[in-house]
Image (spheres, helix red, strand yellow):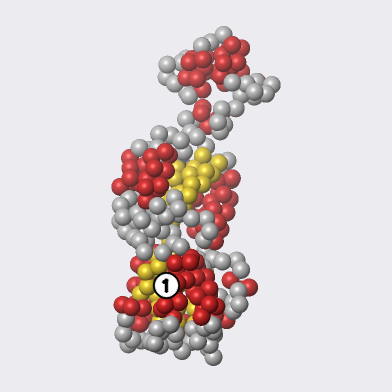
Amino acid sequence: MSGVNLKKLSEELGLSISSVSKALRDSYEISAETKKRVLEMAEKLNYQPNPFARGLRKRKSITIAVVIPEIANNFFSVAIDGIQLIAQQKGYHVLTYLTHEDAQSEESTVKHLQGGRVDGVLISLCGDSASVGHLLSLNESGVPIVFFDRVPETRECPTVTTDDFESGFKATEHLLHAGCKRIAYLRVRGHLSTSQKRMDGYLAALKKNKLHADPKMIVDCTNENMSNVELLKKLLKLKNRPDGIFASVEKLAISTYYACNEIKLKIPEQLKIISFSNLRTASLLSPSLSTITQPAFEIGKESATLLFQMIEKKNFNNRIEQVVLKSDLIERNSSKRK
């Protein structure tokens, strides 16, 4: 029988809608015998509350939420694949929310997820998130939360990240070994932990190689491609322009390609580029893009695995676990020596 709702179910059982609803929620107000009758009839009529009847019987939604700042970044699409794999193994649905790099959107999304809508939350912070109090309140309301990639500075929460400092160091040294003397670091304005750690690695590599860190070479970009292209064209037209670009996120590397094309600057002969990126077509760009490639799929899997351990109440209380996975430096033509 299809299209069975609570009203139909109550009519078949000769019970009130309220009693049937409470029985499905395993309420203490309903006797064990009545609960058994309701569940047997629900199964017989193929009654399916959203998302599953078994979810309501266990007082769970059988759903987790993934909150990310953007989908254009290939890292997040690959990470979601890893999350989906674990969720499917657990018989869970995954709801994905985009904050579009907006702190207010992030906060309203979190409020929407409170109150039992989901059994757990995986989140990567947006660039505008100056505070995470609204996020940590999820734990207080009984909803476990795991941060991945972009995480809070506080150590009082479970996180899954990559070795951003070490990778920033390696990327900078890679450009130095390729012959660069003046390297610009491109970052998106905001409060991102990832950008700060990558920049710290960049600065440490310059210091180790006895090079002056010029503040003018730390470039604050935006989330708008055209604005970044204009900004980079001005940077690359300077008399004392950079001969190397280290982009903290892949969209800034793409903006650099556009800028170089417009001002006829040759890559890698006149400018070498490396970027954090999980861009599947990085090898097909002209020239192919050298990348620090994060283990995005593994980050998704590890994040989801940790979240389900918390949902299943294995060391849920006060769990503070930081998982750090290694990224790979893949040299391609954009940073080749002359």
Is 87 rendered above or below residue 190?
Answer: above
Is 88 rendered above or below residue 181?
Answer: above
Assign the N terminus to one quadrant of the image: top right
How packed is label 1: few (under 14 Cα within 10 Å), some, or many (20 or more)? some
Of residues 10 and 303, the one drawn nearer to the viewer in this rendering:
10
Quarter of the rendering containing residue 47: top right
Is 282 rendered above or below residue 65?
Answer: below
Of residues 194 and 334, the one drawn nearer to the viewer in this rendering:
334
Can residue 151 be seen here? The reply is: no
Quarter of the rendering containing residue 39: top right
Count the numbered circles shown: 1
Residue lying furthest right in this view? 1
Residue that numbered label 1 is attached to: 231
- x%, y% of residue 167? 43, 72
- Residue at image position (38%, 87%) is 240
Q: Amino acid at mark 1?
A: Leu
- Residue at image position (60%, 66%) is 280
Is 177 rendered above or below residue 135?
Answer: below
- Residue at image position (50%, 75%) is 259
- x%, y% of residue 309? 46, 46
Assign the C terminus to one quadrant of the image: bottom right
Residue lying furthest top in this view? 14
- x%, y% of residue 315? 39, 45
Quarter of the rendering containing residue 46: top right
Of residues 38 and 249, the one drawn nearer to the viewer in this rendering:
249
Disc 1, SS: helix
Judge left or right: residue 296 versus residue 128.
right
Of residues 223 and 70, the one drawn nearer to the viewer in this rendering:
223
Judge left or right: residue 80 versus residue 207.
right
Can residue 25 be seen here? The reply is: yes
- Residue at image position (65%, 20%) is 45
- x%, y% of residue 149? 43, 59
